[in-house]
Image (cartoon, coloured by chain):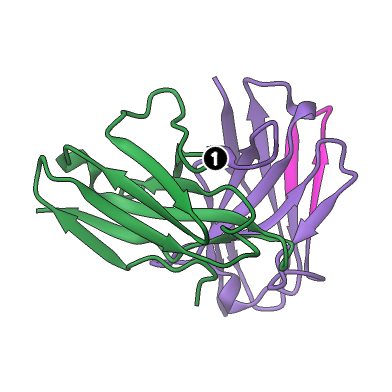
Amino acid sequence: QSVLTQPPSASGTPGQRVTISCSGSNSNIGSNNVNWYQQLPGTAPKLLIYSNNQRPSGVPDRFSGSKSGTSASLAISGLQSEDEADYYCAAWDDSLNAWVFGGGTKLTVL
Amino acid sequence: QVQLVESGGGLVKPGGSLRLSCAASGFTFSDYYLTWIRQAPGKGLEWVSYISSSSTYTIYADSVKGRFTISRDNAKNSVYLQMNSLRAEDTAVYYCARLSMNQEYFQHWGQGTLVTVSS
């Protein structure tokens, strides 16, 4: 059971917009920044969004992040086949004194 | 460019020990916190431990506290994870990652090394 809660799966057709939610609590998302990681099949995770809504250089602006209260979301617009991957949210937890992850969301492009 | 290369994974019996290494290049190693994150087969990501830039601070997940030890050698641009009393549930790919300068996110990841604990 992960500390942060994500839907196990999401899907969309090419060109669509999809969102992935990440729910936490006051001790993690409620008081710290949220980061998102993308893991393409068979590869290591890669930073996708940091500090709630910032994109590292090289990440397309089709990817965006937001945070409100104890929840965060990742939005992917103009969905492409190469976006098919697992997506993880993460945040520092002040109570656990540890980094915590969501369980991951497997995105399928139909 | 930033590179992190893990090594030392393999098959070990329950109760055994293993030492993972992560060799870094492409940045000023002594300026950054480093961390280990693992992923059991077919499962999600689990943070394991981190170490501050000068080794002053180390923090561990409850699941490994007392069994794993993180360390670093800034002269060798390397970070290590000594794993003792290994259990079947420690079986995972172990990733080394560099934190951002403000220690708020995992900015760069290695390719991972597989540890299998089985008799």
Query: Residue A98's quadrant in the figure?
Result: bottom right
Amino acid carrying mark 1 in the image: Ser
Image chain in purple: B
Query: Residue A94's quadrant in the figure?
Result: bottom right
Q: Residue at x 71, y 78 (%)?
A: B15
Q: Residues within 10 Å of mark 1 (few under 14, many from 20)?
A: some
Left or right position of A41 against B68: left
Q: Main secondary structure of the magenta part?
A: strand
Image chain in green: A
Instruction: Say which quadrant the C terminus of chain B sits in.
Output: bottom right
Q: Residue A105 in the image: x percent, y percent?
A: 33, 60
- Is the residue B39 above or below the residue A51 in the image? below
Q: How many marks?
A: 1
Q: Residue A57 in the image: x percent, y percent?
A: 44, 23
Q: Residue at x 32, y 68 (%)?
A: A8
Q: Residue at x 22, y 50 (%)?
A: A18
- Is the residue A46 above or below the residue A106 in the image? above
Q: Is residue B74 magenta?
A: yes
Which residue is farthest right?
B56
Q: Residue A103 in the image: x percent, y percent?
A: 44, 66
Q: Secondary structure at mark 1?
A: loop
Q: Residue A88 in the image: x percent, y percent?
A: 43, 55
* Chain letter of the residue carrying label 1: A
Which residue is farthest front?
A69
Task: Identify the magenta region.
Answer: B69-80
Q: Nearer the viewer, residue B90 or B45?
A: B45
Instruction: Say which quadrant the N terminus of chain B sits in.
Output: top right
Residue under circle 1? A51
Q: Nearer the viewer, residue B102 or B77?
A: B102
